[in-house]
Amino acid sequence: MADNSQNMSYKAGECKGQAQEKGSQMMNKASNATNSAKESCQEAGQQMKAKAQGAADAVKDATGMNK
C-alpha cells in the first residue's frame, strides 16, 4: 500500500511541475506579446511625431517663417 501511495504522490508532484512549467511558458508568451505591442506603439508614435514635424516644417516653408 505504501508503494501505491508513493507512486500517487510522485505523479501528483509530476503534474504540479508540469502545470507550473506551462504557467511559466504562458507568462513568458504574454510578456513577449506585451513588449511587442509596446514597441509597436512606440514606433507608431515616432512615425506620427515625424509626420507632424514634417507638416509643421512645410507650413513654415509655405508661409516664409522658416527663414
Image (cartoon, rainbow, N blue to C red):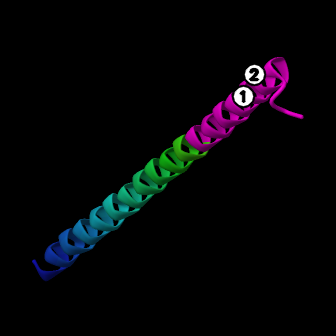
Disc 1 marks which residue?
Answer: 56
Residue 6, position in %: x, y? 20, 78
Q: Give the image location of residue 42, x and y in percent.
A: 60, 44
Secondary structure under tag 1 reads helix
Q: Residue furthest left?
A: 1
Q: Residue 37: x percent and y percent?
A: 53, 41
- Residue ID for mark 2: 59
Q: Which quadrant of the structure image shows residue 50?
A: top right
Q: What amino acid does circle 1 point to? A: Ala
Amino acid on which disc 2 is placed: Val
Residues at circles 1 and 2 in contact by the CB criterion of under 8 Å: yes
The mark total stands at: 2
Q: Residue at x 66, y 36 (%)?
A: 49
Nearest the camera: 64 or 23? 64
Taking depth in this image into account, of 32 and 65 the one nearest to the observer is 65
Look at 51% across and 44% down and name the residue there.
33
> Disc 2 on helix, strand or loop?
helix
Q: Is residue 37 above or below residue 21?
A: above
Count residues near mark 1 (Cα–Cα under 10 Å), then give few for <14, some for 14-19, many for 20+.
few
Instruction: Indicate whether 20 appears above or below 47.
Output: below
**Above or below — where is 15 with respect to 51?**
below
Magenta segment: 40-67
Asked if residue 59 lies in the magenta stretch, the reply is yes
Q: Residues within 10 Å of mark 2 (few under 14, many from 20)?
A: few
Quadrant containing the N terminus in the rendered view: bottom left
Residue 21, position as x, y percentages in the image: 41, 62
Please check the rendered image and state whether residue 61 is part of the magenta-colored stretch, yes or no. yes
Q: Quadrant of the C terminus?
A: top right
